[in-house]
Image (cartoon, coloured by chain):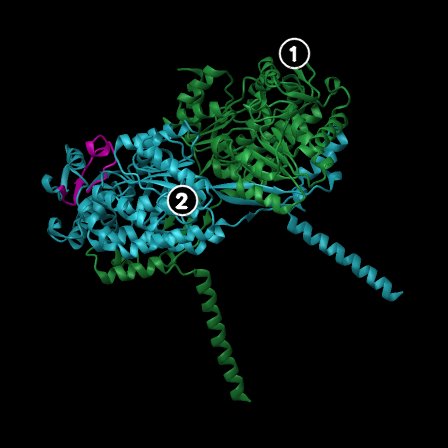
Chain colours: A cyan, B green
Amino acid sequence: MSREQQAVARARKAFETGRSKSVEHRIRQLKNLQRLFTEKQSVISAAVKKDLNKSEAGTQLYETLGLEGELNTAIKHLKEWAAPRPVEKNLLTISDTVYIKPEPLGVVLIIGAWNYPWAVTIQPLIGAIAAGNAAVIKPSEVCVHTAKVMEDLLPLYIDKELYPVVTGGVSETQELLRQRFDHIFYTGNSVVGKLIMEAAAKNLTPVTLELGGKSPCYIDKNCDLTIACRRVAWGKYTNCGQTCIAPDYILCEPSIQDRVIEEVKKAIKEFYTDNPKTCPDYGRIINQRHFKRIMNMLEGSTVAAGGDNEESDCYIAPTVLRDVKPEAKVMQEEIFGPLLPILSVSGLDEAIKFINKGEKPLALYCFSSDNKVINRMTDETSSGGFLANDCLVHFSVGALPFGGVGNSGMGCYHGKYSFDQLSHLRSCLIKKLNMEGVNRMRYPPHTLKKLGWARFFILNSVDLGWVGRMALLAVMAVVAAVVLQYYLL
Amino acid sequence: MSREQLAVQRARKSFQTGKSKPLEYRIHQLKSLLRFITERRRDIADAVKKDLGKSANGTELFETLGLEGEIKLAIEKLAEWAAPRPVEKNLLTITDEVYVQPEPLGVVLIIGAWNYPWSVTLQPLVAAIAAGNAAIIKPSEVSSNSSKVMEELLPQYLDKDLFPVVTGGVSETQELLKQKFDHVFYTGSSTVGRIVMEAAARHLTPVTLELGGKSPCYIDKNCDISMACRRITWGKFVNCGQTCIAPDFVLCEPSIQSRVVEEIKKCIKEFYTENPETFEDYGRIINQHHFKRLMGLMEGSTVAVGGGSDESQCYIAPTVLQDVTGESKVMKEEIFGPLLPIITVSGVDEAIQFINEREKPLVLYVFSNDNKLIKRVIAETSSGALLANDCLVHFTVSALPFGGVGNSGMGCYHGLHGFNQLSHLRSCLIKQLNMEAFNNMRYPPHTDKKLGWARFFLLKQLNVGRVRRMALLAALAGLAAFVVQRFLQWG
């Protein structure tokens, strides 16, 4: 038996003992995870620094703070999320118990990514644990140092049979994908996403795919360009552009292009100093392969800001490209790096047309002071999420489902959505062995009269609240009449 | 270009004009669908009679009534379902607009099944139309008469570009599955379900798979066995057992097996007369292939009731098999026919074990007066749905999501669940280009002080509702104090 097979078999055995199901167990494991982040903050930050050159504060701000929030939310709300959810009754179920019961699915496979290795690997884990599952955690091998830290630290805090960490590369992942899971949660790119779904299909395993794409950013000429560009620059160059919801490219009218470039340049200087290479808060490209990939994309486009780079350091300066054409190399795939192309469009119409020609993105950004522009943009396009007048921050609103559509993914998570995504919401209808008379209308022989009754009960889905009120009034009226009569007489 | 490719292309082009999106249009199409069912009741009933031997009243009761209910519900609730759904705000979004906007996905492929050809093909269509999509409708070729009627009549009621009916067999379906859709909704077997999902994976198309399995039915000895058996008999032999949520087999203690057999025998006689073959409300097996399959399943098991058959008519009598074991032929696959095996177990423990050794079913039935026992079964098993003390009827509660888990499927529908399943629920956050000072805590350089502020805003997820209530109370207290002081001064 391979190492992967063993881990999955052990996790399934552990799940079958039932011990991951009790709310107390789930909360305990989540609290242990909380401790991990408070106690091992420096180990985590050191690894992320080696992988992505992120500063310690940056790691906290962009990775672990969000996780702490999700953990707090899950611990606080778990009982409520896991409780049976009563549903609206109809005439036929008026005396029954009708509810939806959230249940664990079983063994979940979580395949993490390398760009925010903690956030995108542990957030799904929080959902998996909260929902009562076992989970096999496969961190990305590309973030070498973080994968090792995860492999070392997680077993010290959470149940190592229920939640094993399985490290490795392509062949280990393929071996994992041959096993049977009850759900697969994958964060990464669309190409691999297809392979994952194909593998999952063999076992009829449902999947959540958090993919990517080119997230457009439209800047209307009617808006505070200074603030807009500041927010766009922040959204773009955080983690060196290696963010699934980074604004991939800008669409704006030619009349404001120069101004946009100026403002972005100003913001770059403000955030990352005159020499981003030496700024502790400016990151690096994850590895040489991606460095080369991104550098190649510059071909054929005009650099308006930045452009300097150093291969041995995997350093690429915050870069802006101007007058970019749709056929340019940089527009052929998701950039996932610190290159910000600006494409000119004649206005909102052309912007919408351009956006709709491409695949549905994970996020769509629109900067405008004009509500009509924003409304048109939402009405006439589709995307995983939509954010007006800022970048990235919809990610931190736990009440909003986070996920893609079309090529950018399927399924969603965060907060309660994580819990629901990794649960089976089982319909339960508890009837009694009485009132058999009502059922006569459904038994053969099927007469017109019986059909009439069935029609009444199934189609007149009366608002029980209203019926209840009328019934109550009627009863009260009768009682009043009886009492009056009794006392008057 | 193949016929299938053309249909999909036309549907997509039509969807891209935006015409399926306005609520008025969706309601108009749904009302047309309702008219179709009422005006063409005869045509539908005739087709189903030819396909499955169902009576006209049976077709109304088990196919079109539920459909009418779903359409009416969708029409009534559409504005509510399609409206933006505001979400709870946090400290950082307190002045923003935050909501989830349901949107159409695009072009949906609906692959129907033959057992309730109208219900399982058109119910997903109701959801697709309600959600603003275009939809290709591929009825099952096995229920050939219904498929033909759908192909001829549906275009007379619904937009034929947006909602084309594409008929055909395996190769036409394969050709359809090569095209790109925004969602594929499939009802049928797990084997084909895998193939559908694999095909969908190539386009990253999400799927809803309504599959099947062997739905267990546990009868506790503590219950009104007479009533329980009545309901089970009905659930099993409706449509000749060809129901995805039919009780596939019975588990009970040996001490009540004879009683169960007796009671079911009584009910069969009550429902289907002494001679079900000539009885109008007893159906037929869909075709010879399934007839032979079912007759083969009986091999090696003891017939306690029924067993009669007539190949030329695809007739199999309501049959009960007793003393069946887990290894019997009839327990190797979903029966989907009028054979009811009874397997004896020593009690609920063994029943739960037996159930858990097998794939998760679409539905689990438990008959018992003991609430504790029912709760145990719920807690220790998994299934698409669980219904205690009756069969099938959870299907008609549209507030309950209808779907499987594991081998019995993924996704769910009915009512709002169908609408949501075929929509994209898009997160929308509309901020303003002001209060930029606030954002300083997130911009580099990342200092500990800024981090402290971020920590405060992100982690102190104050329940805004509660804050408002406290603020209100405080205001009221202040006002009361002021008023009292004023009046005390007067006095």
Q: Is residue A84 left or right of residue A371?
A: right
Classify residue A259 as left or right of residue A75.
left
Q: Residues within 10 Å of mark 2 (few under 14, many from 20)?
A: many
Q: Please give the residue where the numbered disc 1 appears in the rendered image.
A: B311
Residue that appears at 28% across and 43% down? A217
Q: Which residue occupies the foreground of this view, B436 or A209?
A: A209
Q: Residue furthest top?
A: B312
B277 vs B426, nearest the viewer:
B277
Residue B135: percent from the left, percent from the top? 48, 28
Q: Quadrant of the N terminus of chain B?
A: top left
x, y (%) of residue A69?
A: 35, 54
Residues drawn in magenta: A314-338
Residue A462, image x, y percentages: 66, 45
Disc 2 designates what residue? A128
For the residue marked with disc 1, what is the amino acid? Answer: Glu
Check disc 2 and give the amino acid type.
Answer: Ala
Q: Chain of mark 1?
A: B
Q: Is residue A328 magenta?
A: yes
Residue A40 sits inside the magenta stretch: no
